[in-house]
């Protein structure tokens, strides 16, 4: 009797969630397709840029990124590079100093104080902005690689669109193993959904590995005031504040020249710590849209697990299970395929079904794991 009562409202609820998720994903695809690449305006953008790179123990990667910056088509005299060394214990600082001596590009190494802080990355960025001469702040990470037209694409977008903050695409390279492809697919869902939400007028997700904003806009919203105590969120919390203060001023740069790439994780512990750090932000959101979105995505993925469980125990018909899975997975496949083609990762499209099997468990696991307030990141315990 109790079982029949539960099924009488649980099964319709599962169908409702699956149907709503299908509509939601198709809307993401619609808004993604509406994003246009800004027209190239040679010589018309006049912004000066400060590239901010917070680093800690990036000796294996930082020189490659600096070489990419030296090769930028954006005029060298109109941008500076601020490498914010957060007490690295390897050769990061020495490598940056040596590279700066050998190149004409304005590269400055700024060593941060060895004092406790709840948010090392926010401290690094705030310190950099106080030293920045550029009108436009562009942030990336020490383990990233950028294309020669990266800064030109960002400057063109800033000049052609009335924007205070520009979110740009990030992906993983190389893509050799199964886990590489699965991470590329999973990350493309974040990039695509964040871009679509921005296009729809509800900025929710972005990535600090490829973010640009006006220095004055950062100062106008008080920087990280109110969220400085939270370890993560140097990107999304700032975007939410700028979007609230300057409605319609946040844009996604859908330009392949602006794609930033980084390496996928090769160790489960590194992957776990990063995803837990990302997931830990949702409960601190001060605007409704990203919070509601996080809870909705969690509920939809939990519903897939529940549907599979009901089917396994004979409480849900096979046709119902297949219908629910089709409503979730077919629109998702279309959306992710479009994003992956833009990111230059068409080979990863065939791995979407595998990701779709894993993803519901992944979302629910990290949604619950993030409730534990502490995590380790780059040798530090953060809250």
Image: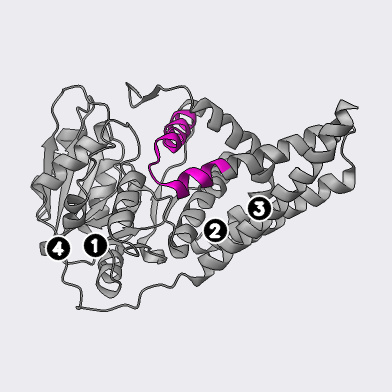
**Of residues 164 and 356, which is closer to you in this image?**
164
Tell me the SS state at disc 4: loop
In the rendered image, which residue does mark 3 sit on? 21
In the rendered image, which residue does mark 4 sit on? 48
Give me the residue at 55% from left, 28% from top.
368
Give me the residue at 81% from left, 41% from top.
11
Cα distance in 3D space between marks 4 and 1: 14 Å
Disc with the residue nearer the chain's start (2 vs 4): 4
Cα distance in 3D space between marks 1 and 2: 25 Å
Label 4 CA crowd tier, 10 Å (few <14, some 14–19, many 20+): some
Using the rendered view, name the quadrant where residue 215 is placed. Answer: bottom left
Question: In this rendering, which labeled residue sits more in front, label 1 or label 2?
Answer: 2
**Of residues 74 and 21, which is closer to you in this image?**
21
In the rendered image, which residue does mark 1 sit on? 72
The number of numbered discs placed on residues in the rendered structure image is 4
Question: In this rendering, which labeled residue sits more in front, label 2 or label 4?
Answer: 4
Tell me if 145 is positioned left or right of 155 in this view. Answer: right
Tell me if 286 is positioned left or right of 323 in this view. Answer: left
Disc with the residue nearer the chain's start (3 vs 4): 3
Give me the residue at 52% from left, 43% from top.
294
Please state the extent of the stretch shown in magenta in the rendering: 270-295
Tell me the SS state at disc 2: helix
């Amino acid at each position: 009797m109790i079982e029949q009562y539960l099924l009488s409202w649980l099964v319709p609820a599962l169908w409702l969630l699956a149907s709503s998720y299908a509509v939601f994903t198709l809307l993401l695809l619609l808004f993604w397709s509406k994003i246009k690449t800004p027209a190239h305006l040679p010589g018309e953008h006049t912004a000066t840029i400060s590239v901010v790179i917070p680093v800690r123990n990036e000796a294996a990667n930082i020189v490659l990124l600096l070489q990419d910056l030296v090769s930028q088509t954006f005029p060298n005299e109109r941008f500076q590079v601020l490498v914010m060394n957060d007490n690295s214990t390897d050769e990061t600082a020495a490598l940056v100093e040596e590279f700066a001596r050998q190149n004409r590009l304005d590269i400055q190494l700024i060593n941060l104080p060895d004092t406790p802080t709840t948010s090392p990355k926010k401290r690094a960025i705030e310190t950099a902005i106080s030293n920045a001469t550029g009108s436009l702040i562009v942030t990336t990470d020490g383990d990233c690689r950028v294309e020669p037209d990266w800064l030109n694409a960002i400057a063109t977008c800033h000049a052609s669109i009335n924007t205070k903050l520009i979110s740009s695409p990030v992906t993983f390279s190389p893509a050799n193993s199964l886990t590489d492809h699965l991470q590329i697919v999973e990350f493309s869902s974040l990039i695509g959904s964040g871009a679509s939400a921005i296009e729809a007028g509800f900025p929710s997700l972005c990535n600090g590995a490829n973010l640009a904003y006006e220095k004055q806009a950062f100062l106008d919203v008080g920087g990280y005031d109110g969220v400085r105590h939270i370890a993560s969120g140097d990107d999304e919390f700032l975007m939410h504040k700028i979007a609230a203060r300057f409605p319609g001023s946040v844009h996604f740069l859908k330009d392949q020249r602006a794609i930033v790439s980084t390496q996928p994780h090769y160790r489960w512990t590194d992957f776990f710590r990063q995803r837990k750090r990302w997931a830990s932000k949702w409960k601190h959101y001060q605007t409704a849209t990203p919070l509601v979105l996080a809870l909705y995505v969690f509920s939809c993925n939990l519903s897939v697990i529940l549907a599979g469980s009901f089917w396994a125990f004979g409480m849900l018909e096979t046709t119902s299970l297949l219908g629910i899975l089709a409503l979730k997975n077919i629109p998702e496949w279309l959306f992710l395929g479009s994003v992956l083609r833009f990111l230059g990762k068409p080979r990863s499209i065939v791995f979407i079904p595998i990701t779709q099997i894993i993803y519901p468990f992944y979302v629910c696991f990290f949604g619950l794991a993030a409730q534990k307030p502490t995590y380790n990141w780059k040798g530090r315990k953060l809250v």
